[in-house]
Amino acid sequence: MSEAPLILWFRRDLRLADNPMLAEAVASGRPLLPVFILDPETEALGAAPKWRLGLGLEVFARALEAVGSRLVLRRGPALQVLADLAAEVGAVGVRWGRLYERGWRARDEGVKAGLKARGLEAVSHPGHTIHEPWEVETGQGGFYRVYTPFWRAVRDRPVGGPLPTPKEVRPVSVWPASDRLEDWRLGQAMVRGAGVVARHVGVGEAVARARLAGFLDGPVDRYAALRDVPAEAVTSGLSENLTYGEISARTVWHAGMRALDEGRAGAAKFLQELVWREFAWHLLHHTPEIALRNWRGEWDAFPWRGDSPEAELWRRGMTGEPFVDAAMREMFVTGTMHNRARMIAASYLTKHLLTDWRVGQAWFEDCLIDWDPAANALGWQWVAGSGPDAAPYFRIFNPATQAGKFDADSVYRRRFVAELSRDPGAEALAFFEAAPRSWGLSPRQRYPAAVVSLVAGRERALAAYGQRNK
């Protein structure tokens, strides 16, 4: 029976190193059939995440070929595809790395039950987070609802060392047919924006490891002091790689701990931010409703506005508030957005424009190459005031004040808002190259007036908050 293959169902774990599923399968000595499935859940991804996934699959397929294997691509419902493949190659079972978002979990539970009903082994493995979401418990046996005690619970918790890269992956004797990646057209919805964002992506395991090494070789020393300054290149850039599992969170944790032991100035803060991602997945597992509705039920009566012409101007980076518009245009040009800028853009939408956080959440889901369902949901609800560990609603980020504090010399705003400069740079102009033609935008147009005055927007938000508490 050792000649009967195992199917390895890759999803958000596109790496060879520190991949528990792959390591255990290689150790079994069996032939292995790696597969990626374009199922309905994956088809539902937003434009930028789906396009970026395609780039990751292309690079990962080459990595598998380098160790004697290949990546088979199939389209269709996951259970049916896996069952068909198992019959084609005589596989005894299927392995995959766990995911924790509600829709993915429901799919995986159905796949596991369906495979077992067909007499096949079905085993899931850890690997997307440092700790499994159910492993970290409060003293009372429940889950953590606040970040700080969660951090205290995990900062000294043992973390197993990263697993090595397999030197060889034993192939199946006969490879089944595979779809062609280009036929999937994963970047179709990006239209002309793909060519712009492509200049800023960093795809694959080798790039992720180089990014981590480069960050810890210098920028980490300035991370704690300057991480909130968008114009400073002091962040790791690993968010997109963690999203697709091109590097494991465990690998990043151990590298950060080594930097901490060496006395590197920003290492502690970097580890805390890595654990914020961990906290987001912890919450999404235990309270999956965080991605769909107000985590705090008392916010259901809050008079959020739905979509509106003002929200559309926010999406287009045309609010007349330079820091907000720079943030929104950065996302269109690079596929990512600086964390401080995300908070300011989100606060402006939910508070100055009094718009439901789910409007912004959906736009980020469509536009971010590092879209993460847990971090996106937690971040939006944190800013809006409706989520766990939230900033109080009356804490309203003033974009002008924030700009004065974190972009005092206007480098970030001028980098992405062409109308603020007589001679705009390439990235500012690239926004108009990436934006849909239907928006009718031009760098020669006059910069718009503010959608709402910052004073009036703040007063309206506080008035709504006051009414909610009566």
Image: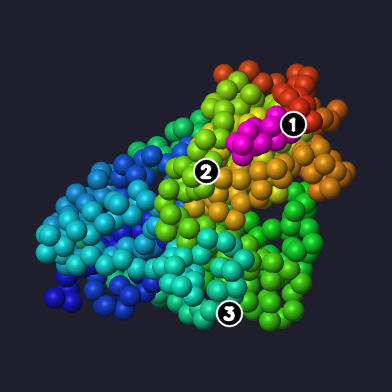
Q: Is residue 229 above or below residue 212?
A: above
Above or below residue 204? Residue 220 is: below
Q: CA distance from mark 2 to mark 3?
A: 35 Å
Instruction: Inspect the image, locate mark 1, and give the three-letter code of the amino acid beneath it.
Output: Glu
**What is the residue that sits farthest to the front in this orientation?**
470
Q: Secondary structure at mark 1?
A: helix
x, y percentage for residue 384? 61, 42
Q: Which residue is mark 2?
A: 298
Q: Quadrant of the N terminus?
A: bottom left
Q: Which mark is residue 156?
A: 3
Q: Are marks 2 and 1 in contact (CB under 8 Å)?
A: no
299, 111: nearer the viewer:
299
Identify the magenta region.
Answer: 458-470
In space, the residues marked 2 and 1 are separated at their CA atoms by 21 Å
Dot placed on the residue nearer the N-terminal end, 2 or 3: 3
From the image, give the main secondary structure of the stretch colored magenta.
helix
**Residue at the image position 51 percent from the left and 64 percent from the top:** 144
Q: Which residue is mark 1?
A: 459
